[in-house]
Image: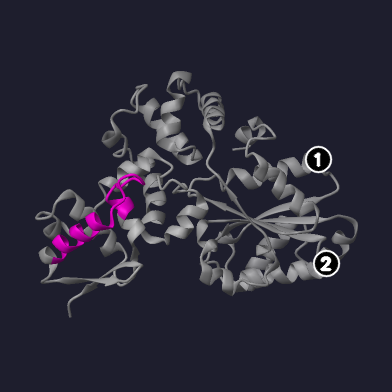
Amino acid sequence: MIGIINKLPKNHFGHISDQTIGSLIKGVSATVTGIPGFGKTYFPRFIEKRINEDFTEIKTAIINLDLLNPYDFNSAMSQIKNRIGCQNSKDIQTYLENISRKNQVILILEGVSSKTDKRLLRLFYNFGNINPTRIVFLTIANYTILDPDFIKESNGYALFAKTLIIPPFDLEGTKRIIDINNNQYGWRISENIVPEIYKFSGGNPALILYISLYLTEYDTDSCEFIDHMLQFPALLARVNDIANVIIREPLSLCYKLGIIGSNGEIFSQLVSHYLGKFEAKGYGFFMKNLSERERRLLSILIENKGKVVEKEKISQIMLQTPDTYSLWAIYKTIQRLKNKIKEFYTIQTIKDKGYVLKEIA
């Protein structure tokens, strides 16, 4: 990983890097998130490297909250002390008070999500209160921290004072990632196929990596066999992670992350293709008598059983485009599906919102 970090140019992540560093050195904590596969391992180390090179007086430490046990305070505290260079026998509050008088301290927190134990968040919040603006946090989190309920719960935590979203890379950034991976892993992905990889990956670093790995493993320079690509386990897992956001999360979050653009199109053709064939697991006995469109529709309703599925999300699953968007087509498909599953499920219409699938008691 260090080898790759050292190969990244200063502008690799675009303006987000400068925004993040600018916020931190002004004493304002920042949270960074993005589409699954946005670079949650590389970004914090890239930022730490830049800070260490450009601001030698600032002390940094990366702490992975996934590795801390909230039920074993002593063990968690010992790991934190080790990461920030505090002797285990010393009081951490005194240590942070002393060091922050001389140097700004930036604690980079990894492994944060809406499921992170609140005791750990409170612990770091209290560290920040020892010397506000001199002890600040860069929190690397998954997309769940954008959930409105989590935002309400975490209101007041300095850790989440400012949220930045890393967008997918453009064509130039995609080429740069491919070149770096070629050099790092000895791959020979041709420059001619870069536009195709960009189209299917949408500029998502994880998808770029695993599409490239697929092409290398199968010694091909074409992405035309999409269904075969989606049988490649490492790539399928990353596509599934992104598709699950569209399937289970509000569309507002999908727009905020950039998974769905302002024109209503999914950012990655590979993810879009996957959703076009998506079926809920374990319901084959239902699916066999349904059309392909009805199977997709039932699958999205099953995955969100008891919750409202927005009309616009159903439009996405039905592969409608902004030009072909039709509430009437959605309504007709819903009615046909209702008749075919009426012995087991009912589909309720929620006016101006969408539809809810409920089991018949």
Location of the N terminus (image quadrant)? top right
140 to the left or right of 201: right
Q: Is the stretch drawn in magenta largely helix, strand or loop?
A: helix
Picture coordinates of residue 153, whole percent (x, y): 58, 74
Give the amino acid type for the residue marked by disc 1 in the picture: Asp
The kind of secondary structure element at disc 2 is: loop
The image quarter containing residue 350 is: bottom left
What is the count of numbered marks? 2
Q: Nearer the viewer, residue 220 or 196?
A: 196
Q: Secondary structure at mark 1?
A: helix
Q: Report the quarter where the C terminus lies.
A: bottom left
Q: Residues within 10 Å of mark 2 (few under 14, many from 20)?
A: some
Q: Which mark, by number, is residue 54?
A: 1
Tell me where residue 101 sits by quadrant: bottom right
Residue at point 20%, 51% (across, down): 293
Q: Which residues are magenta?
A: 315-338
Question: Which amino acid type is marked by label 2?
Answer: Asn
Q: Quadrant of residue 353?
A: bottom left
What's the residue at 30%, 62% (across, down)? Answer: 303
Vertical placement of 119 versus 244: above or below?
below
Is any part of residue 280 visible from this angle?
no
Q: Mark 2 vs mark 1: which is more N-terminal? A: 1
The residue at which mark 2 appears reads as: 131
